[in-house]
Image (tube, helix red, strand yellow):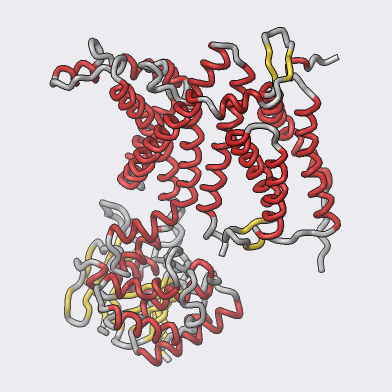
Amino acid sequence: MISKSVKQSAWFFVIPVVFLVAFNALIPLMTVVNYAFQETFGDNVFFWEGLTWFEQVLNSDRFHDAFLRQIMFTSIILLIEVPLGIAIALSMPRKGPWVSVCLVLMALPLLIPWNVVGAMWNIFALPDIGLLGYSLNAIGIDYNFTQQPISAWITTILMDVWHWTSLVVLLAYAGLTAIPEAYYQAAKIDGASKWAVFKWIQLPKMKRVLTIAILLRFMDSFMIYTELIVLTGGGPGNSTTLLSIDLVKLALGQFDLGPAAAMSLVYFFVVLLICWVFYTLMMKNEQQ
Amino acid sequence: MAKISLQDIRHSYLSNPRLDVDFALKHIDIVFEDGGAYALLGPSGCGKTTLLGIVSGLVSPTSGRVLFDEDDVTDMDTIHRHIAQVFQFPVIYDTMTVFDNLAFPLRNRKIPETDVSSRVLEVAKMLDLEEGIHRRAASLTVDGKQKISLGRGLVREDVNVMMFDEPLTVIDQNMKWELRSKLKELHQNVRTTMIYVTHDQTEALTFADEVLAFKPVRQLPRLAFVLNMSDSVSRVSR
Amino acid sequence: MLDLSWMAWTWPTAGFFIFILLCIVSMGIWEKFSPGGGPRRGVFGIDTTRGDRLFISLLGSIFIFLVWLWAFSTPLWGAVMLSFIWALFVFLRV
C-alpha cells in the first residue's frame, strides 16, 4: 500500500476562508443568538429575557401572517420562474452570433441595482403616469397597486419574475450546453420525440444546475427587501409585508432588536430545514 | 439489411466551399456490401466521423448520393434510414433502468410491449446484461454502459447498418479485448452490415473483413489533415 | 482592549456555542480513534455519514425545542428529553 503524504502546510491556505466565514457568518450569527435572549434600549446595555422573545414570535399572529405570505410568494415565484427559465433556456440558440446577444440580454436584469428595479417597476406600474398602470386602466382593467392588495401582489410577482428568471435561464442554459452532441444524435437514431429528448436527456442532465437554481431562488426570495420596499413598502396595509420587510420594521422601525433577532433565527431555521430536505431529496438517487 | 453505396460524396463544413482545402471529404466512392464487416482506419480529423454521419443522416453531404440498396436516401432523415450507431463515449439515459434503455428505440417506434420485452431480454442475454437489468443504467461501469449503447442498436430488427465510432476509446485494456470479440461474435450471429471507425490498426484488423485505410494527403498550415479520399483510400482485404 | 460589548455575550448563550463546539470536537476525536467509514443507508433511505447525523440531530432538536415552546411553553425539560431520544435515534438508525 502506498502511504499518502499529508502536507500540513495546506491548512495555511484555508486561513483566509476561515476569517471570511467568521466575520461574514459566524460572528453576526452569534450576535443574533445573543440578542435573541435579551432586551436592549441602546448603549450596549442588555437585560436577560430568556425565551420570552421566542415565545412571543411563535405565538404572534403578525409573524404567522408574514410567514404565510412569504411561503405563498416563494411558491408562486418558483412555480413561474423555474418552468419559464427552462423554457427560455431551451429556446435559446446553442451556437452562432446570437448566443452572446441572448446571454447579454438575459444578464441585463441581473445587473441592475435592486433599488433601481423597485423604482423602475414603481413608475412603470403607477396608474396615472406609468406605462403598465395607465394602459391597464385605459383598456378598462381596474388596476392600482397602491390601493389594491391583488394588484400589489401581481406587480410584485411580475417584478420578481422579470428580475430573477434570468438566473434560472443562465443556469439551465449552462446545463444544456454541457450535454454532448452525441446524446442528441443517439436520441435521433433511437427515434426519440422532442418531449422524450427533454424528459430523458435534457432534464436529467440539468438536474444539478436546476437544484442550485431552485435553492438560490428559494433562499433569495426570503431575502427580498430592497425592490419590494421601493415598490410597495409592504402595503397596501400589510398585504405585501414579507418576512424581511417585517423583520426590518421590527428591528429598525420599532428598535425591538430582541424580538427581531428571535424572529430571524426562527425563519433562518425554517429556510435551513427546507433547503436541507430539498437538497437531500434531489441528490438521493445520484450516488447509487 | 442493405448494401450501402456512397457515390461521389463531397462534404464541407463551410457554407460556401470553393477550394479543395475547404472540403472535409473530397471525393468518396465506396460500396459497403450487405452483411460485411468494415473498418475505417485513419488518424483523427481525417473525416471518418463525417463519413459515418453521412451514412446515418446526421450530416447531409454537400454533394453526392447515398444509396441503401437501390434507394436514394440522401435526403431521408435519420429515423427513416433504420441505422444504429455507437459513439465514442457511451450514451445512456441515466434515469432509466437498463431494461428501459434497451426498450427505448422500440417503444419510440410503437412496437407492442410484449414484443419489446422478449426482444430486450434476448439482446440483454446476448450482451450479458441480464443481471441487474432492472437497476438504473447510471449504476453500470463504463463498459456496461457501452454495451447498452450497442444493445439499443441490436434490439431493432430492421437495422440496415450498425456503425461504431471508436467505441472502445474509454474502455479498459482487458475489457477492450472482450468487447471486441463480443462484437465479432455478434457480427457472425446477426449478419448486419457493420462499419467500425478506429485509429487503432489492431482493432481494425481483428474486427473487419475489409479495412479501408484513410491517409492524409498533405498537411496544411492551419487545418491539420485534409484528405483527398478518392486516391488515398486503399483497401485491404482478407 | 477590543470592545466586544455590542456582541452582548451571556453565559447561557456562550454555553450553547461551547456545547456545539464540543460536539464537533468530540466527533473529531471519535473519528480519529474509531473511524465511522463511508455513508450508510438508514431508515429514511438517505445516505448519511456521522457528520450528517450530527447535523440532522441538531437541526431536528431545534425544531423539537421550537414546537415544544410553542405548544407547552417553559420549562423545556420535555424538549431536552425528546431531543436526546431523537439524537440517539438518528445516530443509531438514520
Residue A286 sits above or below residue B35 on the image: above
User: On the rendered structure, is A132 left or right of A106?
Assistant: left
Residue at x 54% of width, y 57% of height: A284
Quarter of the picture containing the C terminus of chain A is: bottom right
Q: Where residue B68 sits: x, y (%)?
A: 22, 79
Among the 4 quarters of the image, the one containing residue B59? bottom left
Residue at x 38% of width, y 42% of height: A82
Residue B110 sits above or below residue B210 on the image: above
Q: Where residue B18 sits: x, y (%)?
A: 27, 54
The extreme left residue here reads A139
Q: Where residue B39 sits: x, y (%)?
A: 42, 80
Residue B165 sits above or below residue B192 on the image: above
Quarter of the picture containing the N terminus of chain A is: bottom right
How many circles with numbers are drawn on the protein? Answer: 0
Q: Is residue A43 visible?
A: yes
User: On the rendered structure, is B1 left or right of B229?
Assistant: left
Among the 4 quarters of the image, the one containing residue A38? top right
In this rendered view, identify the residue nearer to me: A265 or C77. C77
Among the 4 quarters of the image, the one containing residue C66? top right
In this rendered view, identify the residue nearer to me: A204 or C88. C88
Residue at x 65% of width, y 24% of height: A52
In this rendered view, identify the residue nearer to me: B219 or B37. B37
User: On the rendered structure, is A97 left or right of A65?
Assistant: left
Q: Is residue B27 visible?
A: no
In this rendered view, identify the residue nearer to me: B113 or C6. C6
Q: Where residue A197 sits: x, y (%)?
A: 33, 59
